Image: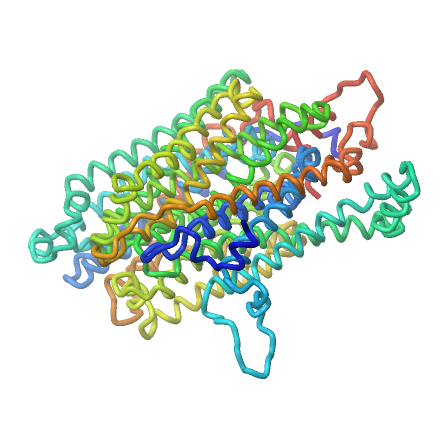
Amino acid sequence: MVAWLIWEGTGIWGLNNPVGWGWAIVNFVFWVGIGHAGTLISAILFLFRQKWRTAINRFAEAMTIFAVICALVFPGIHVGRIWAAYWMLPLPNQMGMWPNFRSPLLWDVFAVSTYFTVSLLFWYVGLVPDLATLRDRAKGKIRYYAYGMLSLGWRGANRHWQNYERAYLLLAGLATPLVLSVHTIVSFDFAVSVIPGWHTTIFPPYFVAGAIFSGFAMVMTLAVPSRKIFGLEDFITVRHIENMNKIILVTGTMVGYAYAMEFFIAWYSGSQYESFAFVNRAFGPYAWAYWIMVSCNVITPQFFWFKKMRTNLTVAFILSIFVNIGMWFERFVITMSLHRDFLPSSWDYYRPTMFDISTFVGSFGLFFTLFLLFLKFLPAVAISEVKGVMPQADPHWEGYGHHGEHGEEAAHG
Amino acid sequence: MGHDKQFTDAPKLDAGMADKAFKIAAAVGAVGILASVGLAFSGDEAKHQFFFSWLTAFMWCLTIGLGALFFIIIHHLTRATWSASTRRIAENVAINLPLMAILFIPIAIGLHDLYHWSHEEAVANDPILKWKAGYLNAPFFFVRAAVYFAVWGGLAWFFRSNSVKQDESGDEALSFKMRRLAPVGILTFALSATFAAFDWTMSLDPHWFSTMFGVYTFAGGVVSWFAFGILAIAWLQKSGALKHTITTGNRHDFGKLMFGFIVFWAYVTFSQYYLIWYANIPEETAWFAHRSVEGWSNIGALIIIGHFIVPFWVLLSRHVKRFPLSLNLAAVWMLLMHFVDLYFVIMPTLHHHGLHFHVLDLTTLLGVGGVFVAAFAFRFKKDAAVAHKDPQLLASMRYDNA
């Protein structure tokens, strides 16, 4: 399908005039957004000294990388001539041709590629001690050499750890602003325009909150089954699930706040185009999508105010699926603001073709293939980091049987 | 890890010290208010100026109070431990919010001077204002103000009174009670603070709108609450109170949070400006156009440098945040910058042609600020300066963030 798409061009997507952006951007934003939770967990929670993060950090970070790869599929196809995709980079050439530096789409190229590079490095640096552990326990020559190469001669020496800790902290510090910048720039793709429903000043933080929201939902979707299948219940505990649900609740409520502000200001602005765009969203031909978005993103997370719901794995899993659906629809709703533009005679309705659908389904296939390969070959839980936060690692640990307040504190730290 | 730490300080601030601060601040406030009111009667132009200056000073104190209320709610919502030792300071700031309702009276009196939309003849000739009249009209404006003050006052009173009750009984059930209200608190807080910002400052230019405006006002308020809190800690410790209870680590965390919210403020402020600049739609750029004329553009530049660039680099350093003098100086600077930021939002409505300082800017600031600080200091006369029977207090003192 994708090959035919590249051969034939994006004309076989359901795009029309006025809907010049369709599922491709929806899926791109969806996948990039999912990536954000991984970086939030691995970098921002690290800087906040949230030690509970260690259990989920590794596979959340892996999820980030795979999600960004999936995201890149869409603009990659959308450029039309994928063999010329490198033209997006500002390479000096004798034709004197440059990309359009004023376009936020180009900033996306820079932001996402930087984000991808730093995330990959961060993930890999974190993996090095664990790869060495795998090397030392490898059965078979090929595995031994493969892990040996990847672990870069790690021997667990004091100097190694010192450099490692410093590099890790620096990469965490670098990754943190990148989380914000990537989705801020993705929001600029829409918000720098003059399209009603796209141009609104709250977009950057609203997109970042939405990205973290959707990403945590995806982490939840992956974590609940994988802890069951691989018997990781003692690593990824109910407390981790509960904490993630709290973040889903917080960011979901922020997204709800942004929806409310958009709606209020659309009316308050007194601009009939703005008002129309929002009334049309809620009651126009795409009302079904709008209400799916609102109910999945704003209403369902509110169940997490209750501890019973937060700690119930089935509820957590089901709600996380709702959030995934809702966040996809959020981007769909935003993009579909296009379908009734300033000129009523050109109004149209966007219908995805089989090529839209199959590319999107394919991106899920790619994502899960990569994720399962990761689970097969690499440690899904950061071994060395989890060791570091066990009570036994505390120099003040008083041995088994002493449930002093210290362990409590470390756990709540 | 400081395991040996116990609560050894006297829970109360020395009554004489609290009284002294109260009297000084009250005197400054009284002189400021009398001078402002006196000047306001000196002519029409001064009267006009008085209301705008008062609104700026009012918003300055109000946003500090809202920042403190936010801090308390988040403390309970997240079951935080580190902030138990400083929560009483926030409670004593937030309990000034009902007082702000009294300080709101001049704004109510000056409605016609401040808000263009409050003139019926202006609305009649302006289709956009006519469209908005369902929201921007005087009766509804006052109803909303009453709701905001009821929400803030109710929350501030609820959290402080239960916390003070705990000083006597040490009953942990009170902590649970406060935690249970926190979710409702944060939701009502977010909406009321947003709409208050829309009503009181954004509607000064009734044609202009920005979905970010509530977040922008909130961010500035939280920065200045942390700045205020840092100075309050310095004052308490200089007066001999809580020297061992509020640790260097606690102050460091205040510094970090102030830093974090400075960055957040810069992010939302930049986004708001940048998106409007890029799209370049006249009805939105008008607001910035008024603020880029000779004089105001310098204030704009000062805000970029003084509210973000300089404090960003200064507060990045760990030493600056842990050393009291440098942290206190940074806090004073941020309070000043927050005032400049509000001045930049409010004052160009009155002086579109350029920056125009007036002595009333200073006298109203001293008046409103003096009353605010006096009321804050007054709270230390009777009740403890720290929630000393809070079950989390020891954890807060032992919390190690070095």
Return the residue nearer the eye: A294 or B216: A294
Q: Is residue B247 above or below residue B170?
A: below
User: Does residue B310 appear to the left or right of B145 in the view shown?
Assistant: right
Q: Quadrant of the C terminus of chain A?
A: top right
Q: Is residue B239 above or below residue A177?
A: above
Image coordinates of residue B41 in percent, x first then y, are: 17, 57
Image coordinates of residue A69 in percent, x first then y, are: 61, 50
Report whether residue B359 is seen: no
Q: Is residue B118 above or below residue A408?
A: below
User: Does residue A369 appear to the left or right of A132 in the view shown?
Assistant: left
Image coordinates of residue A227 in percent, x first then y, are: 68, 26
Return the residue nearer the eye: B330 or B77: B77
Q: Residue at x 40, y 66 (%)?
A: B300
Return the residue nearer the eye: B313 or A40: A40
Return the residue nearer the eye: A42 or B242: A42
Image coordinates of residue A165 in percent, x first then y, are: 78, 48
User: Does residue B144 appear to the left or right of A95 in the view shown?
Assistant: left
Report whether residue A165 is seen: yes
User: Does residue A201 appear to the left or right of A315 in the view shown?
Assistant: left
Q: Residue at x 51, y 53 (%)?
A: B262
Q: Residue at x 50, y 29 (%)?
A: B77
Q: Is residue B262 above or below residue B62?
A: below
**Looking at this rendering, what residue extends furthest in the right direction?**
A141
